[in-house]
Amino acid sequence: MSKLILVPTPIGNLKDITHRALEALADADIVLTEDTRQARKLLSHYKISAPLESHHMFNEHRSVESVCARIRSGVKMALITDAGTPGISDPGFLLVRECIRNGIPVETLPGPTAMIPALVNSGLPSERFCFEGFLPHRKGRRKRFEQLQQEERTMIFFESPYKIVSTLDEMTSWFGSDREASISRELTKIHEETIRGPLSFLTEYYRSKPPKGELVIVIAGKKRKNPQH
């Protein structure tokens, strides 16, 4: 029986792709992707000529049923995103859920994702953490911060370079100016950078040096109060 296979792709360095990922892409009848132009660069680099079809946040709601129907008819589908693992702040969840509902096997290959290198490289506790992805833009943003104020695990966020300073201002207000944090950008690329320090320092750093490229923010959780004896 055919299946859906989710294939992680490099977040920067094209060498960060597994042999299994390349085999899955070469074997697929169709590769679903966010941006066919971006995907073609990757596939061309590895001399893979699988047909590409668009599958992104603007069309996935209306296309998941037809994709499932084609998989059930015997079409081998692979799903990739512009970078990283499908379903992690990228399209993928809706299609996986629909496949499961229709009894279609789903296989996800291990591979690149920005949050784990950023977490480990931060120097903050990594045995327990929570991934928050992109914060809500408006509705629910305040409520999310209220919930996270009491979070004791290390927290991981994604943010764009255009909103990083305003987001750090908010985080400083909610978590405190002295809360330890780390920000990584351009992971696996030539200009990879990780800046560590209190939120107040990071806010001023990026206020004076506007960054390029998507950023991963890692913030220490709230310190536990020492139990009274």
Image (cartoon, helix red, strand yellow):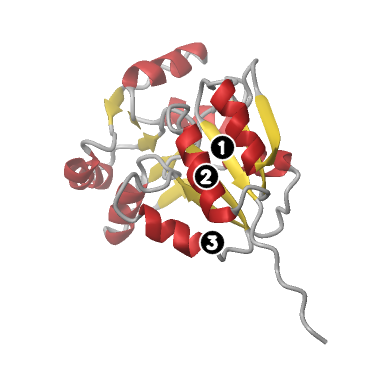
Q: Residue at x 43, y 33 (%)?
A: 163
Tag 1: amino acid = Val
Residue 157 in view: yes
On screen, residue 20 versus residue 79, left or right, reads: right
Callout 3: helix, strand or loop?
Answer: loop
Label 2 sits on what residue type? Phe
Q: Nearer the viewer, residue 104 or 151?
A: 151
Do the numbered discs 1 and 3 sit on residues whose CB atoms are within 8 Å?
no
Q: Residue at x 78, y 84 (%)?
A: 228
Outermost residue toward the right in this view: 229
Gap in angstroms between the C-alphas marked 1 and 3: 19 Å
Q: Earlier in the sequence, mark 3 or mark 2?
A: 3
> What number is the disc on residue 216?
1
Q: Residues within 10 Å of mark 3 (few under 14, many from 20)?
A: some
Give the percent coordinates (x, y) of residue 206: 57, 27
Q: Amino acid at mark 3?
A: Gln
The residue where tag 3 is placed is 149
The answer to whether 58 is drawn above or below residue 229 in the figure is above
* Residue 148 placement (x, y as % from top left): 51, 60
Q: Which residue is mark 2?
A: 157
Label 1 – label 2 distance at C-alpha: 6 Å
Nearer the camera: disc 3 or disc 2: 3
Whole-angstrom CA distance, mark 3 to mark 2, is 14 Å
User: In the image, what residue occupies the spot 45% across and 12% down?
Assistant: 44
Image height of 56 relative to 120, above or below: above
Mark before the other along the chain sequence, 1 or 3: 3
Q: Quadrant of the C terminus?
A: bottom right
Q: Quick one: 138 or 25, which is closer to the camera? A: 138
